[in-house]
Amino acid sequence: MGKYNSIAVIYGSDSSEWEVSCRSGEFVASRIDADKYDVYQIFARFGKWQLVAYRKKNAMRVTFPEGARPEVDKTDFSVNVLGEKVKFDYAYIVQHGAPGESGELQGYLEILRVPFSTCNSSVSTIAFDKYACKSYIRDLGIVKCAPDALVRKGSSDIASVCDRVEGEFRFPVFVKPTIGGSSFGVTMVKNPEDLQGAVEFAFSEGPAVIIEQGIHGRELTCAAYFDGKEVKTLPLIEIVTENEYFDYDAKYNGHSQELCPAKLSAEEEALVSSTTKRIYSFMGCAGIVRMDYILSPEGLYFLEANTIPGMTSASLVPKMVRTAGMDITDFLSVIIENS
């Protein structure tokens, strides 16, 4: 038997990533061990939380049609299912973007003292903001960070920041919203005259934008987790894209190769793995966290931390788990029992 009985898998989100989040959540819910846990699928978007389906131990899955889905009672994190009140005792969070990745959902669950699958609220908040996360680990001295500049909507002189970037950075540069994922709002800028337009475009995804010098090298990703005894990493992946960079099209429309395990020397593999473990431990991470890097001739550059990485059948972490020779159901049980 598992440590918990009723697990709420929460997906949806208030961000542009909500559809990807649904696919991740549905995959996770379908792979959680049916012998150990009752699993409840919660679709949560813009404050409306509804029970989509549930599956009790060793029983058939029951679904609710749209318009007849029970509402989650947020006062105690429960739901009334066909006359039975179910109070969830664990949350598996699969919300890409806010509020699940930003720390807001974690804060709510912390108040109710409900355990969950991810980093705590403060760590999630730091990791969610690309600029804050880089600033947090920049002085550790264990990994390089590309030169960057921050632009805040309404409080920064965009033209002067762009002029400074033009004078100090090598092009191309990448313009990104500081929050969010799946490459929404991201532009690779090759010419200085296109920089301000890219910043304005990134503002469509959030109020702050990071301009980051492009680093030439191999794009790698490494996932770490705690197995109850120690922090471990999964096999590394190298991203080889047909596009100019690993954008939304490359990620979700098959225009990239994800080489797992990455073809690295033993020294390179050890560097990425040990760096990931150290960042995971230093930040106080929990659950499964995927960290992205560029390995260049000048060294290893940190890009970002993903505290709720994609979990569809085609996503990077499930691919790493399969390459490691692990069963995804067993792996999810490890996360649930040790986060």
Image: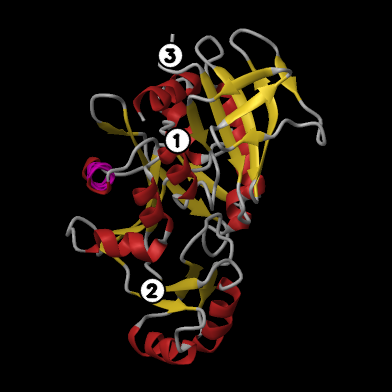
Instruction: Point out the tag, 3 or 1, that comes first from the N-terminus.
Output: 3
| Quadrant housing residue 4 | top left
Q: Is residue 299 visible?
A: no
Q: What are the residue bounds of the magenta stretch?
A: 268-281
Cβ atoms at labels 3 and 1 below 8 Å apart: no
x, y percent for residue 38: 57, 17
Relative to residue 139, is residue 170 depicted above or below?
Answer: below
| Quadrant housing residue 202 | bottom right
Q: Is residue 256 magenta?
A: no
Q: Is residue 271 magenta?
A: yes
At label 2, the amino acid type is Gln
Q: Is residue 86 left or right of residue 299?
A: right
x, y percent for residue 324: 39, 27
Relative to residue 115, is residue 3 depicted above or below?
Answer: above
Separation of marks 3 and 2 at Cα, in angstroms: 47 Å
Residue for badge 1:
112
Kindly identify the residue that appears in the image at 54 percent across and 85 percent down.
Answer: 196
Q: Is residue 118 left or right of residue 187?
A: left
**Circle 2 sits in a helix, a strand or a loop, which is it?**
strand
At label 3, the amino acid type is Gly
Principal secondary structure, stretch drawn in magenta: helix
**Circle 3 sits in a helix, a strand or a loop, which is it?**
loop
In this view, the mark in front (3 or 2): 3
Instruction: Point out the tag, 3 or 2, that comes first from the N-terminus.
Output: 3
For label 2, count other residues whose C-alpha is less than 10 Å away and answer few (under 14), some (14-19) or many (20+).
Answer: many
Instruction: Point out the tag, 2 or 1, that comes first from the N-terminus.
Output: 1
Q: Is residue 64 visible?
A: yes
At label 1, the amino acid type is Leu
Relative to residue 237, is residue 329 depicted above or below?
Answer: above
Residue for badge 3:
2
For label 1, count other residues whose C-alpha is less than 10 Å away and answer few (under 14), some (14-19) or many (20+).
Answer: few
Residue for badge 2:
213
